[in-house]
Amino acid sequence: MFNEIVLSQAANGIVLGFLYVLIAAGLSITFGLLGVINFAHGAFFALGAYFGLMLYQWFGWAAVPLAPILVAVVGMFVEVILVRRLYGKEPLLSLIVTFALALLIEAIIRFIWGADGKPFGAPAFLSGVFEFGPLLMTSYRVAVLVATAVTLAILWAFLAFTPYGRILRAGSRDPEMVEMLGIRLPRVMTGVFGLGCGLAAIAGVLAGPLWNVSPSMSASAVMPAFVIVTIGGLGSLRGATIAGLLVGVVTTLTIQFYPHAAGAAMYVFMFLILLLRPRGLLGERWERFE
Amino acid sequence: MKHPATHRSPAPRRMAAYGSILLMAMLVGASAGAYAQDAGPIKIGMVFPKQGPSASIGEYLSRGAMLAVEQHGKVLGRDVEIIFLDESNAQAAQQNFQKLVDEHKVVGVVGANSSASALAMAGVAERTKTPLIAAGAAAREVTGANCNRYTFRFQATVPVQMAGLMPAVEKQGKNAYFITAAYAFGQDILRTGQTMLQKSGGTAVGVDEVPLNTADYSSYVLKIRSAKPDAVVGGLVGQDLSNFLKQWNAMNMKGKIPFYEIAVSDTDFWDVGPDASTGTYVKPWYYNDPANSQAEKDFTKAFTEKFGKPPADKAYSGWLSMRSLLDAIDAAKSTDSKAIVQALEQWKDAKGAFPAYYREWDHQLIRPSVIVTIKKNITDKWDFFDVDSHTSKTEEDTLKDFGTKEEVGCNMPPL
């Protein structure tokens, strides 16, 4: 019975962890490549959920994949008018400015869509559950796991094998050299910020049918994202992936066996990791993106 | 050249003249200011959530309160000015209450959606001697151990509402699972529910106190599923409850184990839609209750016309709380805080389906709550509930439900 409970919660934790990884991946990229701590990451997550809901209501499920693209465009606009002024400045400044941006986006969401939550369920073909003995998983959560894995694989392939991906990685290590090679780095950085926001929005679209779609849903995303990026190592996507899965499992097992500490579990875990390895699991001293 | 001995310096006499003019000017200015204060609008503070997970509840509370201001018109022949500050958390609520008193000189405050905020603000109310009507808080301490002469409370306490709920829970069986919010309100539900369950011979087969703003409840649902209780008693708040219901339904638990909770709001269910809504609840008021009086129906009609949707119960809470304060200021014929408190203690709303009044020795509003169950078939996007009954039928029974002085534990000093 004990083993069944542990198995059930661990499986649930892995599924939860995949969602956390997707939420954190965009933040990791933004910091790793741009050196900007984007506290508005949760707001773009919420924007993704709202755009997804809006597209579903207007055009049906087929249009929902456009939501992250729209959010990425918004992100690029924000980068051009605001974020690029933060490059090279002290990290506290980017934290303050992006925090203000987060509040602004939440206020805009509330203004446009209202303070009420919005009903947004999973598509009919993904409703239902899988039950294998003690394991209970909704079809939708399995779909989220698959979608996250595919997204991360595409992202990795993009960064590893495409010319643009190589430019991004080179630019994060040596921006002067990249510019001397004739590559216009500002445009690259706009694209990177848009990519980070787009990833947050993918997570928001996937989370919309799971969690309540409301203006304050960003808070549910931004704190786990920061914790996971810190545990994984700033700027490390591989680290964020491992950290996300670990945080998911730690959270669900704590809920099972010591529920009073459920709210603090991920923070205690982060504290322990940083005690043992201050730069995170796979962070580099240099903290550039890998 | 004048001889110094014969030169009379005009400075002292001139200084005295200037000083007198200045003093007169200050006195005239001060009395003009006081006159302006007496003649200007009456300022009333409102402290409800404007952002965060409870923002939609705060919106209904404030809309109901503002509608009451609109309908009431002038107070003491003067306009009413509402200063609306945020209740983002208990600390902010406390600070904003202080700001309302210090900077805006309000004569009273209607506020506090959460019990934590109510407890924090009650301390300021007592210290500054400013009447507070806590419109949303249900934790017993607000008008119990932490009661004070300047704090009034709208919502029925947790023990009163749980007394209305638990008979329905116990009908399902002896084993119940509690999943409650990890703060005053949720802890009160847990404490009260476990005591009542034990008295009836039942057992709590599981207890979870969930941190506020928890988004993912899948692990909690798995725990409940494996514990196999006869019923689940919830104590979750606002969007946390919405999240739980959504995931409860998604994990195929809707209809398998009945769910019960108190002090819920219509918005908790409108947020998740008919598919995910389930359960039996105690709530302060329901807009479509057949027992509603004409005054309540008029309120519903006015709110619906103004905002395009019917009033959630929280709108009614804000409306009646603000009405009571405005009525009390008129009855006191003064903005003096002691006079307002005394007037509130004498206030009675006989227009409702059941008479409502603040009990003199603890300032708890005495009125029954309504017991509702989610409709089997929801066809209206706002009308989710069937009304089962009310927690009491007569004025005497209602008063009995709210407990004796010894049970409540409030000992207020004289005013």
Image (spheres, rainbow, N blue to C red):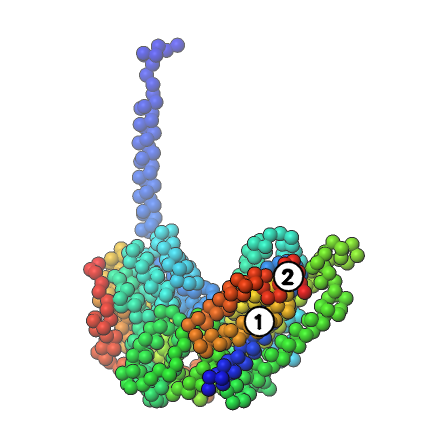
Residue drawn at (58%, 70%), measured in percent from left and top? A243
Q: Is residue B385 left or right of residue A20?
A: left
Element at label 2: loop
Q: Residue extending furthest front?
A: A276
Q: Which residue is mark 2?
A: A284
Q: Residue extending furthest right?
A: A181
Chain on which label 2 sits = A
How far across and down, in percent of the image, does residue B207 sit?
Answer: 39, 78
How far across and down, in percent of the image, does residue B172 sit?
Answer: 35, 89
Q: Which residue is mark 1?
A: A244
Q: Looking at the picture, which amino acid does disc 1 mark? A: Gly
Q: How many marks?
A: 2
Q: Looking at the picture, which amino acid does disc 2 mark? A: Glu
Residue drawn at (71%, 68%), measured in percent from left and top? A159
| Label 1: how many Cα within 10 Å (few below 14, some 14–19, many 20+) | many
Residue drawn at (54%, 68%), measured in percent from left and top? A224
Q: Is residue B320 left or right of residue B332?
A: right
